[in-house]
Amino acid sequence: MSDGDQKKYLTADGLEKLKNEVNLLKNIVRKEITERIEEALKLGDLSENAEYHEAKEAQGMNEAKIRELEDTIKNAEIIETDTKINKKCVNIGCTIEIKTGNTAKEFTIVGSSEANPIKGLISNESPIGSAFMGHREGDDVEVETPMGKVNYKILKIK
């Protein structure tokens, strides 16, 4: 496998969201950009036509995003997020309850394509996500962060 063919870990919901986004980019955004290019072409001289150049740049960025998403979809490996997951140790698809100091938090370990720390979805490849991988309930885990080492205790794996 080349770098572009690496497995991309996704939940079934995450895969569906990516498919919807590709559909939107192909069928709506692509059409809007084509219309912008056609309008800009009517303005004449392309060498000084900012609208044309902006639309062509938007077209390139849209096509690159479509290729990126299609690559992710093609190489997707669906992760289980239900009761079939081995809850004995932290793995992709697990939700973990952790504690540091007096603060308890809950995170779900997901593939990098679905990571959204604000929503509590952390990548298995992130420093904190990778630190928890393979650990069990009750384990103390030390995580190297930009602000130094932080100690966490895994309270529960769901």
Image (cartoon, helix red, strand yellow):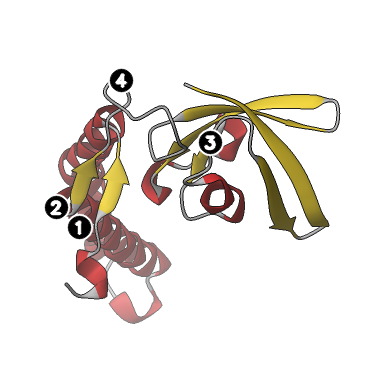
CA separation in Å, label 1 and label 2: 5 Å
* Residue 92: x %, y % from top left: 39, 40
Per the rendering, the mark at residue 82 is 4
For mark 4, give the secondary structure.
loop
Per the rendering, the mark at residue 136 is 3
* Left or right of residue 37, residue 122 in this image: right
| Amino acid of disc 1 | Asp
Q: Nearer the viewer, residue 20 or 33?
A: 20
Q: Nearer the viewer, residue 153 or 39?
A: 153
Residue furthest bottom as drawn = 47
Q: Residue at x 38, y 33 (%)?
A: 93
- Mark 4 Cα shell of 10 Å, populated few (<14), some (14-19), many (≥20): few
Residue 79, by quadrant, is top left
* Left or right of residue 151, residue 7 in this image: left
- Mark 1 Cα shell of 10 Å, populated few (<14), some (14-19), many (≥20): some
Quickly name the residue at label 2. 74
Residue furthest top as drawn = 83
Residues at discs 1 and 2 in contact (Cβ within 8 Å) = yes
Per the rendering, the mark at residue 71 is 1
Q: Nearer the viewer, residue 40 or 124?
A: 124
| Amino acid of disc 3 | Arg
* Residue 37: x %, y % from top left: 24, 59
Q: Mark 4 or mark 2: name the one nearer the start of the chain.
A: 2
* Camera-nearest label, 2 or 3: 3
* Residue 138: x %, y % from top left: 63, 31
